[in-house]
């Protein structure tokens, strides 16, 4: 994946009357598509750390609990397109669920995170999928993520159980480690690629608004069962 941090576009150079028309440069778009993603899952599973690893390539062992929602912007290049991601990091604590719910609606993709060393966070996954069904668009792309893969000796949820759960719910699946930077970029890239693949060809890349991507509900499909797994090993 070719990733770049955000940089403001320089804007259009002023056209001089002396410059032949064919040499004038059109204003450069800063990105082709803009997508919103959202991270959900129980408290302490590592949502903030996954996002910080992806956006800033940092990791904090003393990450504080998220209050309400937070977000980061990250621009990536994939499939020949420049894509600006607005990634919402939600609080895992139940008391913030109603605040987070407001952010599901505009999201094109969701990363549902559990902690492979904490059985309860895995058992709570159906609760998070219900939140998606209730609050998100029906065609949202979903990836289930087992985090803290670096703590194998404390593992409580096998990779096979994670895979089976994702398979049964027609989601992609991957185990990652925010701490060791294992598979973190891959999950975001896979999710974004899936979203790009769904953009109908008649919708040309655009600059600033993602509203053009909102299809009439009648044209929205559900999740595709054939595209289930990514990076199940590693
Ligand atoms: N060993 C290990 N620890 C991790 C990893 N990811 C996160 N942690 C630790 O897990 C704890 C919780 O991480 P957060 O990113 O704050 O978890 P969260 O899901 O955002 O939590 P809430 O904001 O409360 O919902 C922190 O102490 C992190 O350092 C990982 O991949 N490996």
Image (tube, rainbow, N blue to C red):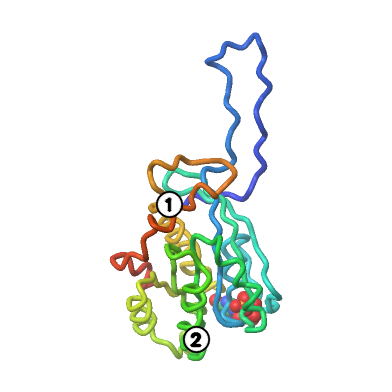
The percent coordinates of residue 43 (x first, y second) are 61, 82
The percent coordinates of residue 113 (x first, y second) are 51, 76
Most extreme residue toward the left is 226
Residue that appears at 49% across and 73% down: 132
Above-or-below relation of 225 to 157:
above
| 143 sits to left or right of 178 | left
Question: If you read the primary sequence from the N terminus, does the residue marked by circle 1 or circle 2 appear first?
Answer: 2
| 102 sits to left or right of 156 | right
Q: Nearer the viewer, residue 84 or 160?
A: 84
Residue that appears at 37% across and 67% down: 230
| 88 sits to left or right of 78 | right
Secondary element at tag 2: loop
Residue that appears at 42% across and 60% down: 190
The quarter of the image holding the C terminus is: bottom left
- The quadrant holding residue 157 is bottom left
Above-or-below relation of 137 to 64:
above
**Residue receiving disc 2:** 124
Q: Nearer the viewer, residue 140 or 92?
A: 140
The percent coordinates of residue 84 (x first, y second) are 56, 50
Most extreme residue toward the top is 18
Secondary element at tag 1: helix
**Residue receiving disc 1:** 196
Alpha carbon distance from label 1 to label 2: 29 Å
- The quadrant holding residue 217 is bottom left
């Amino acid at each position: 994946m070719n990733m770049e941090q955000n940089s403001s576009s320089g804007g259009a150079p002023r056209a001089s009357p002396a410059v032949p028309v064919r040499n004038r440069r059109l204003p450069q778009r800063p990105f082709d598509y803009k997508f919103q993603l959202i991270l959900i899952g129980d408290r302490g599973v590592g949502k903030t750390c996954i996002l910080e690893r992806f956006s800033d390539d940092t990791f904090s062992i003393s990450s504080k609990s998220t209050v309400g929602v937070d977000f980061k912007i990250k621009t990536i290049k994939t499939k020949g397109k420049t894509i600006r991601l607005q990634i919402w990091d939600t609080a895992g604590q139940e008391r913030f669920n109603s605040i987070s719910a407001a952010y599901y609606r505009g999201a094109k993709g969701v990363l549902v995170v559990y902690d492979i060393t904490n059985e309860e966070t895995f058992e709570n996954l159906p609760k998070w999928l219900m939140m998606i069904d209730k609050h998100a668009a029906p065609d949202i792309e979903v990836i289930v993520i087992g985090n803290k893969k670096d703590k194998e000796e404390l593992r409580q949820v096998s990779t096979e159980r994670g895979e089976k759960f994702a398979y049964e719910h027609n989601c992609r699946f991957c185990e990652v480690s925010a701490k060791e930077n294992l598979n973190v970029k891959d999950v975001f890239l896979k999710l974004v690629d899936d979203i790009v693949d769904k953009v109908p060809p008649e919708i040309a890349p655009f600059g600033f608004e993602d509203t053009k991507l909102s299809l009439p509900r009648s044209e929205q499909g559900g999740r595709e069962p054939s595209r289930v797994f990514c990076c199940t090993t590693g």
